[in-house]
Image (cartoon, coloured by chain):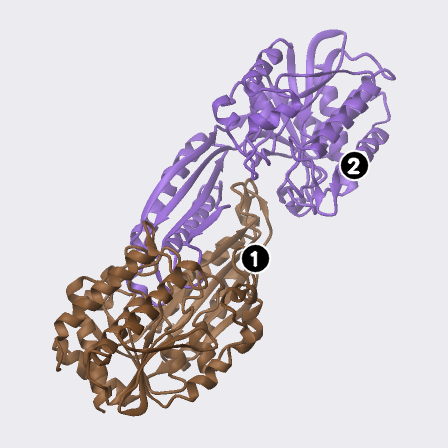
Chain colours: A brown, B purple
Amino acid sequence: MDFDVNQAAKTVVSELRELAQLTSNEDGAQRVAWTPIWDRAVEWFKGKTKAEGADISMDAAHNVWAKITGEREEAIVIGSHLDSVPNGGWLDGALGVVAGMGILRRYGKHGVKPKYTIYVVNWADEEGARFGYSCTGSSAVSGAMDVQTIENLRDNDGVRFADALKNYCLQTADFPKAHEEFLAKPVKAYLELHIEQAPLLEKQRKAAACVYGITGCRRQYITFKGQPAHSGSPITMRQDAFLAAAQASLGFRGLGLKYDAYCTVGKVEVWPNVVTIVPGSCRISLDQRSIDPAVLNTLVEQARAVAQKAAAEHGVQVSFESVWKNPPTIFPDKLVALCREAVAEETGEQTSMVSGPLHDAAEISKLVPAVMMFAMSSQGLSHCKEENTPDRELETAIRAFFRLADKAMQA
Amino acid sequence: MDFDVNQAAKTVVSELRELAQLTSNEDGAQRVAWTPIWDRAVEWFKGKTKAEGADISMDAAHNVWAKITGEREEAIVIGSHLDSVPNGGWLDGALGVVAGMGILRRYGKHGVKPKYTIYVVNWADEEGARFGYSCTGSSAVSGAMDVQTIENLRDNDGVRFADALKNYCLQTADFPKAHEEFLAKPVKAYLELHIEQAPLLEKQRKAAACVYGITGCRRQYITFKGQPAHSGSPITMRQDAFLAAAQASLGFRGLGLKYDAYCTVGKVEVWPNVVTIVPGSCRISLDQRSIDPAVLNTLVEQARAVAQKAAAEHGVQVSFESVWKNPPTIFPDKLVALCREAVAEETGEQTSMVSGPLHDAAEISKLVPAVMMFAMSSQGLSHCKEENTPDRELETAIRAFFRLADKAMQA
């Protein structure tokens, strides 16, 4: 490498701190997409990359593209997202964008002209924290977006997504144009650095890993309907919807363990939710993930059976409402090999793993070769202000990512 | 009996329908205490009893007393409550008050002077539906009320109980005066007819039962604290607060079955309650009941152990907050014997049972001899618009209650 890679990694970390300072309060990062603090983060990104000599453009889905033209028109795209959940962490999403800024700096107006054109992209609204639609900008680009659904989504204050976009002079109907805009770019590879958001790497005392795939996901709501009754009514005569849901939820955990997959009941709503009334109904969410499409189907089927058995044992009814699904992503071997090498050269070990969380790379991978790299997460914490990666491990991961970009640039 | 008991029972049923008409909408009874529809029910009661020649008075806790003076000053008190939960049923509480009106009518201005003075009382706010404090009027009378606590309770709109009382020209500080007012009355016995609110009598094909006691109750909130994590984080590394709560809740049911008692998890709150986040904390309510004080203590102790075991198995913390307790009530043998006789004479069987639900009689029993009678509930439903007792069984229970009043009057 012909630049001071150690210093460049340290600069990325200090820029991440600068961004955190600008966009956090005592409860954590507040860069929720389609809010003024996110706008501030986006402007910060535009200002920083423009100062390095990049050309800035916005596509029809509000993704921001910072471009350094290379010797060839063919392009390497490096990206992630600056938006956060409310009370989020400083690294989720921001790490990948700011690391991209570090690579761009190397080739910017003070650097050398790269072999390939470089884009650093900030995907709009990966978290879906305000309107509930994940990977908004990247799914507009991939073509997977359901425009009808998204324009009618409402935030907790009842504001429609389509109305919130007016502040940005945007229309959801135009979002699919971002797909055409992307296809017009001759993209050779997409690279994304992200924090792990799980404790595996920390347990293994590793700073970084190649990510060779992203689990597919199936989400549903499961509603148990029993009969509300007084808390003084005999237990054997009850139809307790919550206990059926409780039993099913423990069963879902068992399925996750059996198939080395992910099963999560994150949302639980009991009705009428009164101390003295046996719950008459209970709705839970079930999020199931696996890297193997066959396993994913099995998980969903067996969850149905588990819920039906629990319902029958508690004398209640059960119904299922599928709300979202995404197939597993397997990144192409060639980029995965480059990523493994980069990790091995920096850390001494060819660590590689699957991502449980979804990322923009899953969308972009539908169009062009993509790969991801993970930096370890302290205690696996994310989506909270405690989210962290110690500086040493963070810099190691950033340097490994620089190596990956280098390899992609030379390939 | 020297009056047409069949006709009198039918009149009670038709008056119950008249009250329902006046105070219900398509979602059920709306006689929530300290609201205008309850006021309407209270005025209806005052008008009806006054028309029968009763003297009406209100005590310091807004309990309404309709008095027919007898040959002796010693009094029989018959009562229950006209208030309902929101979207409640037509019989819960109202049955006992309106049946009392039926007894009063026998001895009113068109009837015979009774041996003992008769009071029919409408206890204020038995349900605690608006401010969350049960047996408000009867606990003011019993002296058990915690005035400091009650005046600061707020409804769902943030209105303080003390402020809501201004519409009634009442002050919580005066509530304990109702205790003195009651003690000034030479009460010989308190009688209360209520619906069962459970399906036991229906399963046994019985219309009425003597209630010889009311279960004691212990209520607590149990909070499980784990660690929020992404739904893509490995299951074995999670600290899932909801799954700990789910496992504990199933364990509580087991305790209820083991000790022939009542355990209910009615309220469940998960945080952050997001589809893609493993619950970081979960608070549940636990309501435990038994007629045996020793069993009640055992239930609470073992529930603690069950919760701690579930917490340990899921790697989460657990804490307990006791919120309310009430000791078991056992009614005196003499009144219970009269009540058993009354039921047996009317139905042919000496049915007797314990009440799982709490009633005003538990408070009043602290001061004077009391007993209750139950009418069967269709499907055990209560606190909902489907609450019902078929006319035939309802009239049977009312006639049995008339017999009980007769017996108390002759004793």
Q: Residue at x 69, y 26 (%)?
A: B341
Q: Give the percent coordinates (x, y) of residue A370.
A: 32, 83
Quarter of the image where the N terminus of chain A is located = bottom left
Q: Is residue A123 above or below residue B338?
A: below
Q: Give the percent coordinates (x, y) of residue A338.
A: 22, 86
Instruction: Name the residue beneath numbered marker 2.
Output: B22
Q: Residue at x 51, y 64 (%)?
A: A167
- Say what amino acid the circle numbered 2 marks: Leu
- Front position in the image: B8 or A168: A168
Q: Give the percent coordinates (x, y) of residue B190.
A: 65, 20
Quarter of the image where the C terminus of chain A is located = bottom left
Residue B105 visible in the displayed image? yes
- Front position in the image: A19 or B79: A19
- Chain at numbered mark 1: A
Count of numbered badges drawn on the protein: 2
Which label sits on residue A72?
Answer: none
- Front position in the image: B90 or A88: A88
Q: Give the percent coordinates (x, y) of residue B301.
A: 36, 38
Instruction: Name the residue beneath numbered marker 1.
Output: A158
Give the crowd class for mark 2: few <14, some 14-19, many >=20 residues within 10 Å.
Answer: some
> Disc 1 on helix, strand or loop?
loop
Q: Does the residue at mark 2 contact the one at mark 1 (Cβ under 8 Å)?
A: no
- Chain at numbered mark 2: B
- Say what amino acid the circle numbered 1 marks: Gly
Residue B293 is left or right of residue A316, and the answer is left
Q: Is residue B247 above or below residue B41?
A: below
Residue A30 is left or right of residue B133, and the answer is left
Residue A292 placement: quadrant: bottom left
